[in-house]
C-alpha cells in the first residue's frame, strides 16, 4: 500500500469504528453512490482545496451531503480533512469505508447482474443461496444486464457466482486462444 | 437458445436443497494495473505465491498480501489486464513442467515451448518452491564433475552436487565455461539445464545452436526468460530450471544447472520489489535478496539416493569489482568461485581464470586421484610465479632458482590455455600435467608447450592404449605406469622435435 492508501485506510477504520451503528443499509448504498460520483467527477473535490472562506466550503459540504443523503458525520470528516489538507483522500476514504463496513458488520455486499427481470421472490431465493454459500448476511443491489445473454452474475469484493452464457462463451474463447 | 429466468432460479433451488455449492469462486477486483503488476482488492484468503487467473485470460502470481490489497505480478504481456477486471483464485502455486520428455527442448519460464517442436508432453508439473533437502538426506560431495577445462579440473575442481560461482566482467568468457562444461557431459549421464535470465534473444539462440551443433541438446533443457519478457518470468526462470533439475535428481540421476546470470535475476527481483514499494536497501536491492539466491542454490547438492544437482551460477561484475552486493552474496552462498579476469583475457590467456582469486571449497575431495597426483604444488608454483613476475618487472637481477621458477610459471600458464569447445578427458589432463611435472616441457619452446602436451596425451592413447586405459579405469597412475609414462615421454620428445 502506498502512503495515501494507508492514511485513507486509517481514516476509514476510525470512521467505521465510531459510526458503523449509524450506517444503515440505505446509507451504505448512498456512500457507494457518492463514491461513484466522485470517481467520475474527481474535480469536484478541488473546490474544497481552494482557499475559499470556510462558510463557502461548509455550504458546499452541506449540499454534497444533501445530494447523496449522507449522514451528517461525513461533514465532520470532510472538515477534518480540509484542516489537514487531505481532502483529496476523501474519495479513497469512502471506498475504504465500504470495505471496512462489510468486515466490521460481517455483511457482504453483492451486486447482482441478471439477464432478465426477476420478481422479488426469485431474488429472495438468490439472496438465501448467497447467504448459505458465504455464511454471512447479504446486502445487495441488482440490475438487468443483457450482456450476460442469459444467466446471473453475483459479485462481491471477494466472491463471484456466475452462471451465464457470456461466461461460457468467454471460457470457450480463452480455451480456443490457448490452444491456438 | 432460450433460457428462462425461472430455469436459472431453479439452479439456486437445487443448491439450497443440499446440492454442492458449486462455482462460488473467491475473487478480487483489479484496482490498478501498470508495469506488469496489478493491485487487487479482495482475494481475502489467497496465499502467498498463489497463481491468479484474470477473467480476460491473463495470469499472475501473488507477491504481496496487504490488509486491503494483494499485489499480483503478471505472467504474460498479453492479454491486457483492465481495471475492474475480476481476478480469480486457482488454489495452486506456480508449477513447472518436468520430465525426461523435456530433454532437447527450449522452454520459457512459464513452461511454454520456444522451439518449433510442438507440445511439451511433460511427465509431471511440480511446484517451483519446494522444501530444501535436509542434512540427513544429503551425502558428501566426493565425485568429480569433469568440466573438460584443464585449469578448472586441475586447480579448482568441481564435484557433483557442488555450487561453483562463475564470476567476472562482461565478455570474459563466463558463459563459454558453462557451455564447455555442458558440452563435456556428453555420454556421461549428466542431464544439463541451461537457464538464461534477462539476456538478449540472439545470445540465447546462439547458445541453443551451439548445443545443437555439438549434439548436447539431447541431454539438455534450456529455460529462457529474455530481457523482453515480463519481469516475473525473469524471476521465475531459475526456479523453473531448478525444479526440472530436481526431477532428474529425484530419479537418482545427476544434473548440472547453469544460471546465466543471477545478477540479472537480482535486478529483476529489485524491480519487482520497488514496484511493490518494499523498502530498498543497499544498491536499492530489497532486504531479502540474499534469501532469494540462498534458497535457490541450497536446492543443489548430492543426495543419498545417488542423484545430484551441480549448480554453476554466473554473476556479472562491474570493472572486476567482486565486492559489490550481489557478487559478495553469491560468493558467500556458493562452495567456491571461478573468477575470470579482464586483464588476463586481454593478454590472450583463455580461459581467463584468475587462479589466485578462484577457489573450490570442496577441493581435492572432488578430484580423481590421477589428477591429484599430478597437480600437487601446481597452485603454489603458479602463486610463486605471479609473485616473482611482479618483482621481475622492476628489472631486478634474479638468481637462477627464481629464473627457473619464472620459466616454469610461464610454461604452466601456456599449458593451461585452452580454446573454446575443446575438452580434455581426465586422463588427457593427467598426462598433460604429468609431462609438466616431470619437467619434459622445460626444454620445449613456449609457443609449442600446449601442442606438445596435447600430442603426448594423444600419443599415449593411440600407441600405448593399455596404459591409457588402465589410468582411465583405475583413475590412478601406478608406479609402474609412472615409469612407463616417463619412458614414453622420452620417446615422444624425440619424435616431436
Image (tube, coloured by chain):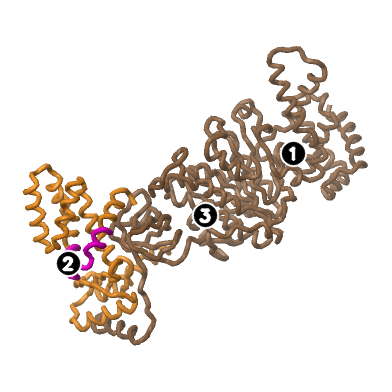
Chain colours: A orange, B brown
Which disc number belongs to residue B154? 1
Instruction: Determine the residue positioned at 84% across, 45% down.
Output: B476
Instruction: Select label 1 or label 3 by which is in front.
Output: 1
Q: Quadrant of the N terminus of chain B?
A: bottom left
Q: CA distance from mark 1 to mark 3?
A: 34 Å
Q: Local crowd at mark 3 within 10 Å, few (<14), some, or many (≥20)? A: many
Element assignment for label 3: strand
Task: Give the total number of marks visible in the rendering.
Answer: 3
Instruction: Determine the residue positioned at 58% across, 57% down.
Output: B244
On whether disc 1 and disc 2 are found on a single subunit, the reply is: no
Q: Quadrant of the C terminus of chain B?
A: top right
Element assignment for label 2: helix
Q: Is residue A25 magenta?
A: yes
- Residue B154 is left or right of residue B67, and the answer is right
Instruction: Determine the residue positioned at 30% across, 82% down.
Output: B12
Is residue B121 in view from this perspective? no
Instruction: Determine the residue positioned at 83% across, 24% down.
Output: B443
Residue B289 pos. (x, y %)? 50, 46
Q: CA distance from mark 1 to mark 2?
A: 79 Å
Q: Main secondary structure of the magenta part?
A: helix
The image quadrant that residue B50 belongs to is bottom left
The image quadrant that residue B45 belongs to is bottom left
Tell me which segment is drawn in magenta.
Answer: A13-32
Is A46 or B402 nearer to us in this picture?
A46
Which disc number belongs to residue B465? none
- Which chain is disc 1 placed on? B
Residue B422 pos. (x, y %)? 69, 39
Is A17 or A161 nearer to us in this picture?
A17
Kindly identify which residue carries mark 3: B107
Kindly identify which residue carries mark 2: A27
Is residue B173 in view from this perspective? yes
Amino acid at each position: 500500500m502506498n502512503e495515501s492508501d494507508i492514511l485513507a485506510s486509517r481514516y476509514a477504520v476510525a470512521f467505521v469504528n465510531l459510526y458503523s451503528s449509524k450506517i444503515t443499509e440505505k446509507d451504505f448504498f448512498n456512500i457507494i453512490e457518492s463514491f461513484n460520483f466522485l470517481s467520475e467527477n474527481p474535480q469536484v473535490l478541488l473546490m474544497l482545496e481552494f482557499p475559499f472562506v470556510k462558510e463557502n466550503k461548509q455550504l458546499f459540504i452541506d449540499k454534497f451531503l444533501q445530494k447523496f443523503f449522507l449522514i451528517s458525520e461525513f461533514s465532520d470528516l470532510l472538515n477534518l480533512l480540509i484542516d489537514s489538507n487531505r481532502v483529496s483522500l476523501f474519495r479513497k476514504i469512502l471506498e475504504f469505508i465500504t470495505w471496512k463496513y462489510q468486515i466490521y458488520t460481517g455483511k457482504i455486499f453483492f451486486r447482482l447482474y441478471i439477464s432478465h427481470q426477476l420478481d422479488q421472490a426469485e431474488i429472495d431465493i438468490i439472496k438465501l443461496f448467497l447467504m448459505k454459500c458465504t455464511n454471512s448476511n447479504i446486502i445487495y443491489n441488482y440490475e438487468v444486464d443483457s450482456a450476460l445473454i442469459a444467466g446471473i452474475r453475483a459479485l462481491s469484493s471477494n466472491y463471484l457466482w456466475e452462471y451465464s452464457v457470456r461466461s461460457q462463451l468467454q471460457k470457450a474463447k480463452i480455451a480456443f486462444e490457448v490452444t491456438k | 437458445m432460450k433460457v428462462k429466468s425461472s430455469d436459472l432460479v431453479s439452479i439456486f433451488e437445487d443448491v439450497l436443497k443440499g446440492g454442492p455449492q458449486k462455482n462460488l469462486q473467491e475473487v478480487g477486483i483489479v484496482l490498478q494495473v501498470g508495469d506488469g503488476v496489478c493491485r487487487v482488492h479482495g482475494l481475502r484468503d489467497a496465499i502467498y505465491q498463489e497463481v491468479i487467473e484474470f477473467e480476460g485470460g491473463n495470469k499472475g502470481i501473488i507477491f504481496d498480501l496487504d490488509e486491503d490489497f494483494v499485489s499480483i505480478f503478471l505472467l504474460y504481456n498479453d492479454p491486457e489486464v483492465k481495471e475492474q477486471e475480476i481476478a480469480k483464485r486457482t488454489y495452486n502455486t506456480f508449477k513447472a513442467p518436468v520430465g525426461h520428455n523435456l530433454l532437447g527442448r527450449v522452454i520459457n519460464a512459464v513452461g511454454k515451448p520456444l522451439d518449433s517442436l510442438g507440445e511439451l508432453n511433460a511427465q509431471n508439473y511440480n511446484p517451483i518452491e519446494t522444501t530444501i533437502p535436509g542434512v540427513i538426506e544429503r551425502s558428501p560431495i566426493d565425485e568429480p564433475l569433469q568440466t573438460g577445462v584443464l585449469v578448472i579440473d586441475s586447480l579448482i575442481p568441481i564435484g557433483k552436487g557442488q555450487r561453483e560461482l562463475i564470476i567476472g566482467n562482461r565478455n570474459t568468457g563466463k558463459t563459454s565455461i558453462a557451455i564447455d562444461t555442458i558440452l563435456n557431459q556428453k555420454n556421461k549421464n549428466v542431464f544439463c539445464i541451461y537457464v538464461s535470465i534477462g539476456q538478449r534473444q540472439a545470445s540465447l539462440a546462439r547458445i541453443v545452436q551451439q548445443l545443437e551443433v555439438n549434439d548436447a541438446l539431447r541431454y539438455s533443457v534450456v529455460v529462457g526468460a529474455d530481457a523482453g519478457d515480463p519481469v516475473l518470468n525473469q524471476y521465475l526462470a531459475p526456479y523453473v530450471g531448478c525444479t526440472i533439475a530436481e526431477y532428474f535428481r529425484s530419479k537418482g540421476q545427476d544434473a548440472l544447472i547453469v544460471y546465466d546470470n543471477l545478477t540479472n535475476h537480482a535486478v529483476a527481483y529489485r524491480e519487482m520489489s520497488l514496484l511493490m514499494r518494499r523498502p530498498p536497501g543497499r544498491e536499492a536491492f530489497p532486504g531479502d535478496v540474499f534469501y532469494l539466491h540462498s534458497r535457490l542454490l541450497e536446492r543443489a547438492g548430492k543426495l543419498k539416493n545417488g542423484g545430484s544437482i551441480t549448480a554453476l551460477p554466473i554473476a556479472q561484475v562491474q570493472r572486476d569489482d567482486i565486492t559489490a552486493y550481489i557478487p559478495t552474496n553469491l560468493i558467500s552462498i556458493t562452495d567456491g568461485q571461478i573468477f575470470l579476469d579482464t586483464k588476463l583475457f586481454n593478454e590472450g590467456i583463455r580461459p581467463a581464470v584468475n587462479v589466485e582469486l578462484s577457489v573450490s571449497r570442496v577441493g581435492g575431495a572432488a578430484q580423481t586421484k590421477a589428477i591429484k597426483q599430478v597437480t600437487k604444488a601446481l597452485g603454489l608454483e603458479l602463486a610463486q610465479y605471479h609473485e616473482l613476475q611482479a618483482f621481475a618487472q622492476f628489472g631486478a637481477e634474479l638468481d637462477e632458482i627464481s629464473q627457473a621458477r619464472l620459466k616454469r610459471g610461464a610454461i604452466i600458464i601456456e599449458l593451461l590455455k585452452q580454446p573454446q569447445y575443446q575438452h580434455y578427458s581426465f586422463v588427457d589432463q593427467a598426462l598433460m600435467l604429468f609431462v609438466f611435472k616431470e619437467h619434459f616441457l622445460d626444454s620445449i619452446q613456449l609457443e609449442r608447450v600446449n601442442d606438445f602436451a596435447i600430442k603426448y596425451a594423444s600419443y599415449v592413447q593411440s600407441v600405448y592404449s593399455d596404459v591409457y586405459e588402465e589410468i582411465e579405469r583405475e583413475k590412478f597412475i601406478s608406479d609402474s605406469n609412472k615409469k612407463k609414462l616417463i619412458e614414453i615421454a622420452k620417446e615422444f620428445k624425440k619424435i616431436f622435435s
